[in-house]
Amino acid sequence: MKKSLKRSLSAGGLLILIAVLVLSRLAWFSSKDSSNAVAQGGGGALPVSAVIVQPDTMDNVLKAAGTLVASEELFVTTEISGMVRSIHFDEGTRVKQGDLLVSIDDAELQAQRDKAIHQKELISQTLERQRVLLEKEAISREAFDKVQTDMLVIESELTLLNTRISKMQIRAPFDGVIGFRGVSPGTYLQPGQPIARLVKASPLRLEFSVPERYQSDRLQGRQVVFNVAGYSEDFYAEVYAIEPSVDERTRSLMLRALYPNKDYRLLPGMFADLRIIISRDLDVLQVPSEAIIPQMDGDQLYVYRGGKAELINVRTGRRSEKTVAVTEGLAAGDTVITSGILQLRSGMPVSLQGTGF
């Protein structure tokens, strides 16, 4: 009985000793953490970031997505049949309006024209002789008119031959970049057969749509700022055309803007993120979006006053990508707390770690 009691006392003493050691250790860690918090926060104050608000401009920005489209684009074709004699362009190069692209064999037409020219000379000589004879009344008027008619016919044939010969020289209809060719010397072309794609990439059209509610904002002539993949810079276009009707399916309005693209840096088909400044408000108090605390009956935020965080009610207005306009409850020069919002309570001591704006 005594031995059992001693064992129980020994075990109980050991447990008590372990408990004391654990509690002591926890107290030491708690004391250390508290010391660190005080050292970092300035006497127990919660470190926060803040901004000093001042009146500034705020833009009402319309954002959309669009596509860059060639101002002109077509497949170069031929109107008449014939064999390709020579190619006069390199794939993927710039060409000017009127540049020769493809020559079709016109030897047969040239021979027909030479024959027609010779016939015209003979008829012209006959016509002069007949005119002299007509003046002397040596021939009838009908005989003279027949030769004159022959001259009109041969001249018409020459005009037609010259037109057909000119069509054997396929030229660029406008300035642009010529694509991959689909023919080679020796290819027999049929009317309408594609030869190569010609794209006018300077200027480029930027096509995009906006919700129908913006139709009253006078978008014609407005500047469009857009970005494309592969470039960090902004590009600028100008709205030059608006579709006269709203798409009933999407309830949107199609617009076109013009981008010069003088250096041919951008290509048709590229996707663009764009924005248009609809209006610009002056002297607006703005705060970072993260500072706003939404409530059922309005919005709130914390301001720094006398070393403490003070919760105030505010009325907010327009929102931008990063900021919110405050229309009531805030004054210029107020310091708005932007970090640690979930930890704050009104009247809590805080220390500022940095201010912006």
Image (tube, rainbow, N blue to C red):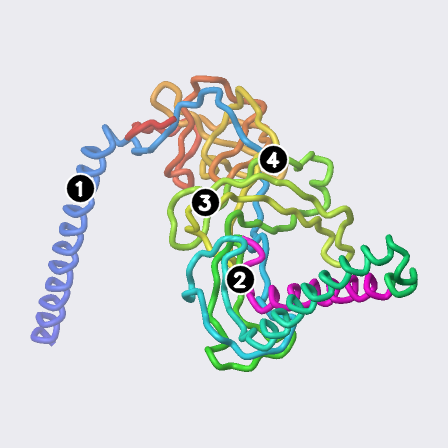
**Residue occupying image coordinates x 50% and y 64%:** 101
* Mark 4 in CB contact with mark 3 (< 8 angstroms): no
Locate residue 295 relative to residue 129 in the image: left or right: left
User: Could you say which disc has been placed on residue 222 in the image?
Assistant: 4
Numbered range of the magenta stretch: 146-174
- Spatial CA distance of label 2 from label 3 is 17 Å
Residue, disc 1: 31
Q: Say if the magenta span includes residue 157.
A: yes
Residue 154 on image: x %, y %: 74, 66
Residue, disc 3: 262
Pick whichever of labels 1 and 4 is earlier in the sequence: 1
- Spatial CA distance of label 2 from label 1 is 78 Å
**Residue occupying image coordinates x 69% and y 40%:** 214
Q: Nearer the viewer, residue 6 or 278?
A: 278
Q: Nearer the viewer, residue 199 or 159?
A: 159
The amino acid on which the numbered mark 4 sits, given as a three-letter code, is Arg
Q: Say if the magenta span includes residue 199.
A: no
The amino acid on which the numbered mark 3 sits, given as a three-letter code, is Lys
Dot 1 lies on which element?
Answer: helix
The amino acid on which the numbered mark 1 sits, given as a three-letter code, is Ser
Residue, disc 2: 198
**Residue occupying image coordinates x 45% and y 34%:** 288
Dot 3 lies on which element?
Answer: loop
From the image, give the main secondary structure of the stretch colored magenta.
Answer: helix
Quadrant assignment for the N terminus: bottom left
Q: Nearer the viewer, residue 323 or 7?
A: 323
- Spatial CA distance of label 3 from label 1 is 69 Å
Locate residue 278 relative to residue 357 in the image: left or right: right
Pick whichever of labels 2 and 1 is earlier in the sequence: 1
Pick whichever of labels 4 and 2 is earlier in the sequence: 2
- Spatial CA distance of label 1 from label 4 is 64 Å
Pick whichever of labels 4 and 3 is earlier in the sequence: 4
